[in-house]
Amino acid sequence: MALLNKEIALAQPAVTSALCPTAGQLALPEKVLQFGTGMLLRGLPDYLIDRANRQGVFNGRIVVVKSTDGGDLTAFERQDNLFTVAVRGFDDGQAVEENVICGSISRVLSAKSQWVEILKFATSPELQVVISNTTEVGIQFVNEPIELMPPQSFPGKLLAVLHARYQAFGGAAERGLVIVPTELLPDNGDKLQRIVLELAHRNNLGAEFLDWLETANTFCNSLVDRIVPGRPDAATSAAMQAELGYEDELLTVAEAYYLWAIEGDEQVRKVLSFCQANPNVIIRPDINLFRELKLRLLNGTHTLSFALAHLAGIETVREALENTQLARFIHNLMLADLLPGIAYPVDDKVGQRFGMQVLDRFRNPYLEHRWLAISMQASAKMHMRTVPTLLHYVKTHHAVPCYYALGFAAYLLFMRGTRQADGSFRGEINGASYPIQDERAAYFADLWAHFTPAELTQAVLHNSGLWGHDLLALPGLADQVTHYLNQLLDQGAAQTLATFFKQETVMVN
């Protein structure tokens, strides 16, 4: 079977039934600079821009920056920067199965080896938009010179791009960019702007450039919501590629539902004209309601459930919703603990309806969303997605949310890893090992090597560097987390859940 390439895409329908780009779409000017090649970007912004281009709206392509060589970079080269998005799910109760060959990406450049070319594109008069998804740990301040080739951090790279553009156009105000980070951080655009401005000060780039940076460029807070679980398993992938008629190393499966909420005005809407072809790209002055519901209920539930599900031997989100005890845990965690903990005014009916929609999306039979994929950078996700909810719940209810405490205890056990010869960390459950892909993996490995479960719990909760707060000060939290952690160690996840619900029933009666 041939690998997806430009010839296959343009030969449609002779080769494939997938929706293909035209030669005209593949020749559109490059208007977007994108930092990241991950599944979420391919399955949402890249897909939506492709869809707009098909309708004669926006009419621009994307230059992608990859921070590390290998992997997707070479796959894009082999496939002429084309990839397939397989949309699977339900829309208004109707099943959706759609295969789209996306032609929105024109080039994928390596930051390590092609930084000069990236800076050259920064001076293009066609460039209008910057998009990023570098995970929650990507938007961090690193004090570094932007003359590095390239700078280490994403904000450093972005500042170098903006400075090159400023110099090329003599500080022309109309050459500023609309910058839309999609990292799942509250007020992600504001945070990125603060870091870039601070780094510009540290680099002594001058008052005129700083003024241009603030006034000519627009940093937009944004929220993306679409489950893009990654490449399907080997059997499903083979079946899908047999249906497509070609092989695709970048095959991306996404649910039918999507939302991209962007904070902006009419000028932002004009630049991001792809919103005209995508009704769930919402541009408005305040997106906090969308952000809080998605971040706290969908992402927060993922973050507080992945470890318990994995420790119970459940590999995917859908399988967890088919397990009576885990389904009950996930439902109650979301609607009994997390929804009341949202520190933003949310009508209870709106929150309940959103939560039930999320549960339906979790049950999507077409998706294989793996808990181990959700576990990546779990510590940063726990901080950003769940700690504010915990703090507000305790403040308003004067009690510890019990589902939260159990999910947090399972996270602590999941993080019990050992360093491997290659420097990575792996945990073990029931004789099977699993990767721990977390920047705090070494910290947890050291704690597990030297502390009892009770001591470890207290040390972790007390670490305000992890959470931004001393969680040990929350009355009763350490005792509950320690209790559940000891149960998980002694009984395993399945029995702990059974005991948990038996005790809950006794308390209710």
Image (cartoon, rainbow, N blue to C red):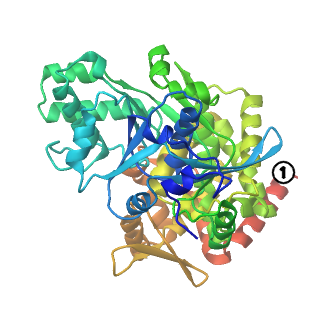
- Residue 273 x %, y %: 51, 24
Q: Quadrant of the N terminus?
A: bottom right
Q: Quadrant of residue 296?
A: top right
Q: In this view, does 130 lie to the left or right of 164?
A: right
- In the image, 489 versus 287, the foreground residue is 287
Q: In which quarter of the image is residue 201?
A: top left
Please say if 144 is above or below 79: above
Please say if 426 is above or below 476: below
Q: Is residue 35 visible?
A: yes
Query: At label 1, which amino acid type do we have?
Result: Val
Q: Can residue 461 be seen in this view?
A: no
Q: Quadrant of residue 176?
A: top left
User: What residue appears at the point 53 percent right and 34 percent down from the top-left corner?
Assistant: 53
User: What residue appears at the point 48 percent right and 16 percent down from the top-left corner?
Assistant: 265
- Residue 479 x %, y %: 58, 58
User: What residue appears at the point 46 percent right and 55 percent down from the top-left corner?
Assistant: 379
Please say if 385 is above or below 212: below
Residue found at the very far right of the displayed protein: 509
- How many labels sit on residues? 1
Q: What element carries label 1?
A: helix
Q: Mark 1 points at which residue?
A: 508
- Residue 411 x %, y %: 55, 62
